[in-house]
Image (cartoon, helix red, strand yellow):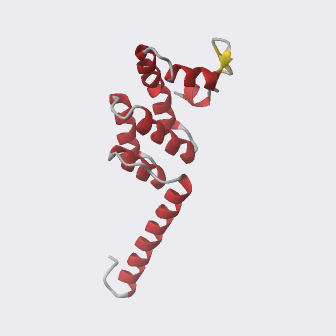
Amino acid sequence: MADIVNARAPAHVAGRPWAEAVLGALADPDPAVRRLCPADVVPDVSALVAGDPDPEIRIKAVKVLGNLVPGETGARSAVVAAATGDPDPAVRRAASLVAAGQHPPSHQRLRRQARSRRSKAAARAEAQVRDGGGGC
């Protein structure tokens, strides 16, 4: 997996710039070509969700899986795994929303929401201790 995560996209595919080649395949008049293209990226994008060190990249990869191949079993598994096990709360939240069929907000907004939830939880815990309701 480290090879996939650290690899760069090729500059050219079949003599065309990489992004142009992928977008061209998605717009191909042949349905067989259009069907193959999104499913072919699932393993690589799933590897980003599972192993990229940057939470923003993991969130973007989750969104790609949710938008591009929502019914693909491998895509769904990667999104559910991120929703339940990613170390970053913003990634977990984004993946939870995608798994529920919703579109998550931006990375920055997810970060603010995660900080706000932690702040509110800490304030409640402090209030319990202060009021004598918490502690061992």
Q: Quadrant of the C terminus?
A: bottom left
Vertical relation: 27 (above or below) 86 = above
Q: Residue at x 45, y 25 (%)?
A: 38
Image point (44%, 14%), residue name: 30
Q: Please, is residue 17 above or below residue 135 in the view?
A: above
Point out residue 81 in the picture as x, y percentages from the top left corner.
Answer: 37, 40
Q: Nearer the viewer, residue 54 or 70?
A: 70
Rendered location of residue 67, percent (x, y):
43, 38
Residue, far front: 29
Q: Nearer the viewer, residue 127 or 111?
A: 111
Residue at the top extreme, as displayed: 14
Residue beneath the point at 41% across and 46% down = 95
Q: Is residue 7 left or right of residue 129?
A: right
Image quadrant assignment for residue 98: top left
Q: Is residue 102 left or right of residue 46?
A: left
Farthest bottom residue? 131
Q: Nearer the viewer, residue 69 or 82?
A: 69
Q: Is 47 positioned to the left or the right of 18 in the image?
A: left
The location of residue 130, given as percent across then percent down, is 39, 86
What is the number of callouts on the image? 0
Q: Is residue 32 above or below residue 69?
A: above
Residue 133 lies, in percent from the top left, at 31, 83
Which image quarter: residue 78?
top left
Figure check: 113 above or below 132: above
